[in-house]
Image (tube, coloured by chain):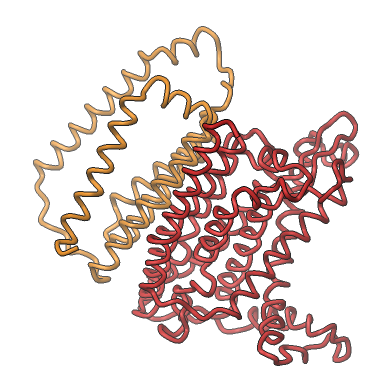
Chain colours: A orange, B red
């Protein structure tokens, strides 16, 4: 199961990068999101999986594709002249990021616990649990995020609708 | 169940899962295809016509034109499979599947009968057992994925009418999803749980305790949004045959079109099952506290098919909205009503009622 979802995620991400057609690339990205949602389910966090699908695949990507369809035509974009230095630099940065990520995961508490106690399936995260944590431990962050979203929304309306 | 499991060399749990998947898949498929017939006969009834009644098995047995289904199926199979020259071939092939798979998947969470115990095992009558942590978020997530079928079909056809239809329908779905989710959230709040089986258990067997009575506003919003989600008239802007030929499925023929049409009806079945589960007590039988399994399944089927019929009924009664009216209704009527429902119930709960 893990391999299947990991493959979906990786192939989706690769397809998104390599595909020249922008809409097909967007669909590959949806596939990658789907794979990530599957990985969340395997990590006993179905709430995150559902939210991943609802928010990213169901709303954000639809809007992105919608805008692309509305603005651009069907032609594939011509490739720009490639800069070799960019390629090497980006490869270096990606490698550094990957090494850092792996190091961080290997040093984390969860992995050490896994080594000492073996893998046990934790109880699944529930929506009630997420709500309780949000409102007990992170109330300030939650409120600030809400306020920021509101500000963003008001800003978007103010920018687009000048004569209300 | 144990004998079946031992015959197949698996555990009873896995065998039961397989049986459930087969039951649900075939039932939804069967109902969806029968509903194409119900739709045409219902339209004929409402418009004072006769409707399809000529197709007959072996030239004799007419059964009210039900053989039309078989005739349609055979016709779709043998029709030439055309695709437009400028279409994006891969996506053009993929789109019917992208439409069909989410439509079938959505039903998995819905309990279609009460649990029963046999031989020490508890058997749940829903493909995903209760307590899986996804609960009612699952149909919302799958509903979000359903947009892609229409969107991909529209774009890959490479046809301006199709793209118009696809864009309209994706905009509709995204804007109505918010009102729908808020209506469901207020149900989570009053139930104290988000698993469909918890929601059903909390409603009890008395019809005036079902969610439709305290949350009538939520029901109206949810049901309206279901029309937008399933792309049916009065909100079928993906098709809109008087404006944009046939919208997203203009270029589709043969079995591909058939899959798109079946996906619409499977979606309709899931939507009516959701309405029955959330607002009308699911498998609860009115005034019977502990119904038998068969009775509970029957009760669920009756409720679900009633709402499926309401979908057909409304389709042939109301005219199509104009696009700006649709957006107006979605953002300026449904969303505030849904908010109001949420706030009123939060207020009532905080005052201990």
Residue depicted at 61% across the width and 74% down the height: B314
Work out which quarter of the rendered image holds the C terminus of chain B and state it: top right
Task: From the viewer's side, name the closer residue of B62 and B210.
Answer: B210
Q: Furthest residue to the top?
A: A116
Residue A89: horizontal and vertical position, in percent?
A: 13, 36
Residue depicted at 34% across the width and 55% down the height: A26
Task: From the viewer's side, name the closer residue of B72 and A71.
Answer: A71
Q: Is residue B323 toward the left or the right of residue A91 in the image? A: right
Residue B326: horizontal and vertical position, in percent?
A: 41, 70
Q: Is residue A148 toward the left or the right of residue B128 in the image? A: left
Determine which quarter of the picture holds residue A160. Answer: bottom left
- A126 above or below B249? above
Residue depicted at 41% across the width and 12% down the height: A109
- Disc count in the image? 0
- A16 above or below A98? below
Task: From the viewer's side, name the closer residue of A10 and B158.
Answer: B158
Residue B26: horizontal and vertical position, in percent?
A: 74, 60
Residue depicted at 34% across the width and 79% down the height: B160
Q: Is residue B180 toward the left or the right of residue B71 in the image? A: left
Work out which quarter of the rendered image holds the N terminus of chain B and state it: top right
Task: From the viewer's side, name the closer residue of B231 and B27.
Answer: B231
């Amino acid at each position: 199961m893990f391999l299947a979802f990991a493959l979906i995620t990786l192939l989706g991400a690769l397809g998104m990068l390599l595909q020249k057609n922008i809409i097909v690339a967007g669909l590959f990205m949806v596939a990658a999101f789907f794979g990530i949602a599957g990985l969340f389910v395997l990590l006993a966090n179905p709430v995150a999986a559902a939210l991943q699908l609802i928010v990213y695949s169901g709303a954000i990507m639809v809007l992105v594709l919608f805008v692309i369809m509305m603005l651009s035509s069907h032609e594939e974009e011509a490739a720009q002249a490639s800069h070799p230095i960019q390629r090497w630099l980006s490869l270096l940065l990606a490698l550094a990021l990957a090494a850092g990520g792996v190091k961080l995961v290997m040093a984390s508490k969860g992995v050490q616990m896994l080594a000492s106690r073996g893998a046990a399936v934790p109880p699944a995260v529930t929506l009630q649990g997420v709500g309780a944590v949000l409102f007990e431990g992170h109330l300030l962050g939650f409120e600030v995020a809400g306020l920021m979203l509101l500000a963003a929304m008001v800003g978007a309306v103010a920018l687009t609708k000048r004569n209300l | 169940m144990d004998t079946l499991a031992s015959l197949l060399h698996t555990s009873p749990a896995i065998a039961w899962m397989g049986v459930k998947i087969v039951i649900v898949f075939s039932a939804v498929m069967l109902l969806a295809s029968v509903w194409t017939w119900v739709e045409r006969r219902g339209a004929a009834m409402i418009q004072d016509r006769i409707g399809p009644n000529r197709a007959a098995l072996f030239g004799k047995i007419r059964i009210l034109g039900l053989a039309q289904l078989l005739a349609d199926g055979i016709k779709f199979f043998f029709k030439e499979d055309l695709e437009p020259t400028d279409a994006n071939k891969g996506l053009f092939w993929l789109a019917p599947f992208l439409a069909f798979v989410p439509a079938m998947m959505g039903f998995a969470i819905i309990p279609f009968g009460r649990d029963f115990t046999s031989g020490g095992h508890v058997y749940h009558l829903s493909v995903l057992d209760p307590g899986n942590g996804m609960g009612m978020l699952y149909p919302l997530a799958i509903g979000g994925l359903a947009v892609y079928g229409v969107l991909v079909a529209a774009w890959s056809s490479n046809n301006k009418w199709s793209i118009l239809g696809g864009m309209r329908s994706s905009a509709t779905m995204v804007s109505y999803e918010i009102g729908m989710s808020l209506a469901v959230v207020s149900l989570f709040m009053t139930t104290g749980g988000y698993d469909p089986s918890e929601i059903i258990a909390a409603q009890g067997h008395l019809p005036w305790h079902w969610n439709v009575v305290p949350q009538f506003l939520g029901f109206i919003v949810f049901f309206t949004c279901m029309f937008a989600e399933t792309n049916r008239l009065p909100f079928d802007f993906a098709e809109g045959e008087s404006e944009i030929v046939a919208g997203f499925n203009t270029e589709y023929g043969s079995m591909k079109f058939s899959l798109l049409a079946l996906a619409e009806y499977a979606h309709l079945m899931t939507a009516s099952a959701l309405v029955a589960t959330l607002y009308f007590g699911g498998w609860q039988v009115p005034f019977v506290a502990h119904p038998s399994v068969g009775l509970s399944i029957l009760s669920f089927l009756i409720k679900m098919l009633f709402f499926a019929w309401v979908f057909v009924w409304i389709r042939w009664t109301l005219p199509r909205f104009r696009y700006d009216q649709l957006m107006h209704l979605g953002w300026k009527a449904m969303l505030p009503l849904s908010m109001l429902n949420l706030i009123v119930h939060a207020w009532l709960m905080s005052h201990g009622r």
